[in-house]
């Protein structure tokens, strides 16, 4: 690592002049014999020469003032640059941050009750630990910030110490504590812009998009410029508004002036290009970030991801190794291990995974909760049930970001609980973030549950968003998509009810022979009653029996077909 803040600041000062230097007068008492006193003639000659020299210098000074060619303003030193960056809400370079830490360390040794200086030193420790992955500095930060609050309570105007504690809680992934510290400052000093970045991080970690949006907007009102643009670009990115995120990130990069600030803006452009599936553009932006500020070590890992997508594997391996050397974060060990595994180098992969476990254990000793990262590793390379327990713990802590929801849904699927995992996976994708890995996880879970239409759409979304989002998972996404095949023509068959089946035609009667038809007609004639005779003009009275017979024979003629007795 090029800079180490624990160095004594005296060791970085240029050495004092050597007594043997012929242009340096020896210290008083360095010579045993004093020089002889000058003569009167020598004294007068020196006085005259001095008067002439003084006149020449005075004339030269007047000419310089008249011509306006005096010395320009003094260039700010590293401490001043770091203070200016902090005041503006921008990142300082690692070398300037080192100088600021050394300066404040020396000051508080002789001024142990200077609460503002202690708050500045504690916050600088947090930033150094975050930027260097040296988690040991979190304990120093906590101790120093508490000393600041002992010297002056937060209620008495020491809000910066509270902001430092909020930043420390975010760095340790304790987002609830960060929210409490930040909102305490906001209630007392609603126009203190420095509290809003830590609140944005806390709300984002808790998955509270509404509060994060409001805090970002307020920060933009109170603090214009590159820091507000950077935060706004991240907000758009988290909501899936890719074009807005890209335009805002470009504006931030164009307006950035200090090297560390510009390098961070270029790094963000590289990440956006990578997420869009444009690895060549990503490599260009990460390279530009590293040229601008060699301390932008995160760009080494970003560059490695993009090089994998371009199949420049040897360069990618070297970039990952350099990133882990300069910024030993466990997520880089996981990515490098998966790259080794995709290449069939299982021994090297196991080495990286063992290193990941060591980093997570060291972070835990420093108070950093790496449960999310460890659960992602366990789900795919270890014990999925352990991953589920870790992530349920995060959910109980109200850590309900898209990243936690996606990881929990996937861990449940890997543990054989796909139906339960579906809800969390849908929640992650439902936030709007355009993450190929989230879409892949949801698609695989839906395929397991035989929901083939949505599964196909999400797998297509993953491959379309970033075809090389993971050296292990991206090929599996393409295989799963091929196994599902093409959708049926005309769309899914269950969108419209099926048409009713056609009714069966009535069977036609078989033709009968002529003799059979004649027999049927003869039987019909025998059963048909004869019509009564027409009455005469002067009928004789009929007997009662004859009247009843006539009435009985007439009734069927009115009611319908007659029947045989």
Image (cartoon, helix red, strand yellow):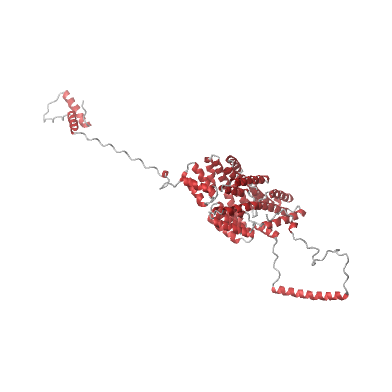
- Tell me if I can see residue 109 in this picture: yes
In the rendered view, would you say 503 is above or below 315?
above
Quarter occupied by the C terminus: top left
| Viewer-nearest residue: 519 or 128 | 128
| Viewer-nearest residue: 524 or 42 | 42
| Viewer-nearest residue: 283 or 455 | 283
Residue 34: where, in percent of width, then height? 88, 67
Residue 501: where, in percent of width, then height? 35, 40
Residue 82: where, in percent of width, then height? 68, 58
For residue 181, side relative to residue 457 (left or right): right
- Tell me if I can see residue 431 in this picture: no
For residue 423, side relative to residue 227 (left or right): left
Residue 375: where, in percent of width, then height? 60, 44
The residue located at (87%, 76%) in the rendering is 41
Q: Dividing the picture into quarters, in which one does residue 498 lie? A: top left
Quarter occupied by the N terminus: bottom right
Q: Dividing the picture into quarters, in which one does residue 409 lie? A: top right
In the rendered view, would you say 345 is above or below 56?
above
């Amino acid at each position: 690592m090029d800079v180490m803040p624990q160095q004594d600041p005296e060791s970085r000062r240029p050495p004092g002049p050597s007594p043997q230097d012929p242009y340096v007068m020896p210290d008083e008492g360095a010579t045993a014999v004093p020089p002889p006193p000058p003569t009167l003639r020598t004294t007068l000659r020196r006085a005259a020469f001095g008067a002439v020299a003084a006149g020449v210098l005075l004339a030269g000074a007047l000419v310089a003032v008249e011509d306006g060619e005096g010395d320009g303003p003094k260039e700010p030193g590293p401490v001043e640059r770091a203070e200016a960056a902090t005041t503006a809400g921008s990142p300082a370079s690692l070398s300037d941050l080192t100088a600021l830490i050394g300066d404040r360390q020396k000051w508080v040794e002789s001024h142990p009750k200077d609460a503002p200086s202690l708050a500045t030193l504690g916050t600088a420790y947090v930033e150094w630990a975050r930027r260097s992955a040296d988690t040991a500095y979190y304990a120093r930060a906590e101790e120093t910030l508490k000393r600041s609050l002992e010297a002056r309570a937060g209620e008495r105007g020491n809000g910066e110490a509270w902001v430092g504690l909020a930043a420390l809680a975010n760095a340790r992934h304790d987002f609830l504590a960060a929210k409490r510290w930040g909102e305490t400052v906001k209630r007392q000093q609603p126009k203190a812009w420095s509290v809003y970045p830590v609140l944005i991080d806390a709300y984002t970690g808790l998955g509270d998009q509404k509060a994060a949006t409001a805090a970002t907007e307020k920060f933009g009102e109170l603090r214009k410029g590159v820091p507000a643009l950077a935060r706004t670009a991240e907000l758009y990115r988290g909501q899936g508004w890719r074009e807005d995120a890209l335009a805002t990130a470009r504006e931030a990069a164009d307006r950035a002036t200090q090297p560390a600030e510009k390098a961070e803006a270029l790094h963000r452009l590289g990440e956006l290009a990578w997420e869009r599936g444009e690895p060549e553009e990503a490599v260009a932006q990460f390279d530009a970030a590293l040229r601008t500020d060699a301390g932008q070590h995160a760009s080494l890992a970003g560059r490695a991801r993009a090089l994998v997508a371009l199949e420049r594997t040897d360069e990618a391996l070297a970039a990952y190794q350099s990133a882990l050397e300069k910024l030993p974060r466990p997520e880089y060990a996981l990515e490098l291990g998966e790259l080794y595994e995709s290449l069939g180098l299982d021994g090297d992969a196991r080495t990286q995974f063992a290193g990941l476990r060591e980093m997570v254990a060291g972070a835990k000793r420093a108070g950093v909760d790496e449960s999310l990262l460890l659960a992602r590793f366990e789900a795919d390379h270890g014990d999925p049930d352990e991953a589920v327990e870790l992530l349920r713990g995060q959910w109980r802590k109200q850590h309900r970001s898209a990243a936690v929801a996606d990881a929990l849904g996937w861990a449940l699927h890997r543990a054989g609980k796909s139906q339960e995992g579906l809800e969390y996976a849908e929640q992650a994708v439902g936030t709007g973030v355009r993450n190929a890995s989230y879409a892949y996880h949801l698609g695989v879970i839906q395929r397991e549950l035989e929901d083939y239409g949505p599964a196909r759409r999400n797998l297509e979304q993953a491959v379309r968003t970033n075809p090389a989002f993971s050296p292990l998972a991206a090929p599996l996404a393409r295989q799963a998509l091929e196994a599902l095949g093409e959708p049926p023509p005309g769309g899914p068959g269950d969108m419209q009810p099926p048409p009713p089946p056609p009714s069966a035609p009535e069977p036609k009667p078989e033709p009968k022979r002529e003799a059979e038809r004649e027999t049927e007609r003869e039987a019909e004639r025998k059963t048909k009653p004869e019509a009564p005779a027409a009455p005469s003009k002067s009928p004789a009275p009929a007997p009662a029996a004859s009247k009843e017979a006539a009435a009985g024979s007439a009734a069927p003629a009115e009611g319908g077909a007659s029947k045989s007795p």
